[in-house]
Image (tube, rainbow, N blue to C red):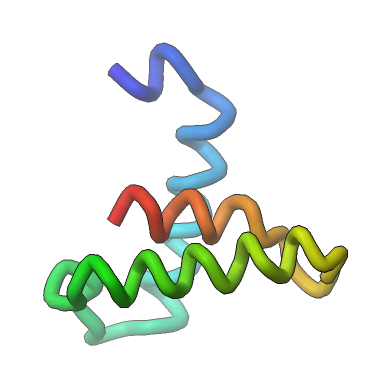
């Protein structure tokens, strides 16, 4: 359903998840507590708000919030 409503966002989040699967092999994000994902999302949003351009922070933040 999400893919039909927000196809571009779905593709972006999917790309972030695929990259994470490659760079963090063997880690199970499902086993981490929600607070961990929330803290990581907040970190990305804070960096985005501060103007950091080292990486696209919005997509990783969205991923963390969906986890």
Q: Quadrant of the C terminus?
A: bottom left
Between residue 20 and residue 37, name the one nearer to us.
Answer: 37
Q: In this view, does 52 lie to the left or right of 9?
A: right
Name the image quarter holding residue 17: bottom left
Residue lying at the far left in this picture: please name it. Answer: 31
Please name the residue shown 38% across and 83% down the image: 24
Please name the residue shown 18% across and 74% down the image: 33
Q: In this view, does 17 lie to the left or right of 27?
A: right
Total count of labels: 0
- Residue 54 in the image: above or below residue 15: below
Q: Is residue 44 left or right of residue 1?
A: right
Q: Quadrant of the N terminus?
A: top left
Residue 45 screen position, x and y as percent: 63, 60
Between residue 5 and residue 58, name the one nearer to us.
Answer: 58
- Residue 22 in the image: above or below residue 15: below
Residue 21 screen position, x and y as percent: 36, 71
Between residue 7 and residue 37, name the one nearer to us.
Answer: 37
Please name the residue shown 35% across and 69% down the image: 37
Residue 46 screen position, x and y as percent: 67, 67
Please name the residue shown 33% across and 49% down the image: 66
Name the image quarter holding residue 53: bottom right
Q: Is residue 56 left or right of residue 14?
A: right
């Amino acid at each position: 359903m999400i893919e039909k409503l927000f196809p571009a966002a779905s593709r972006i989040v999917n790309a972030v998840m695929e990259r994470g699967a490659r760079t963090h092999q063997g880690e199970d994000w499902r086993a981490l507590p929600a607070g961990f994902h929330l803290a990581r999302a907040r970190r990305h949003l804070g960096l985005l708000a501060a103007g950091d351009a080292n990486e696209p922070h919005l997509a990783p933040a969205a991923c963390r919030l969906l986890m």
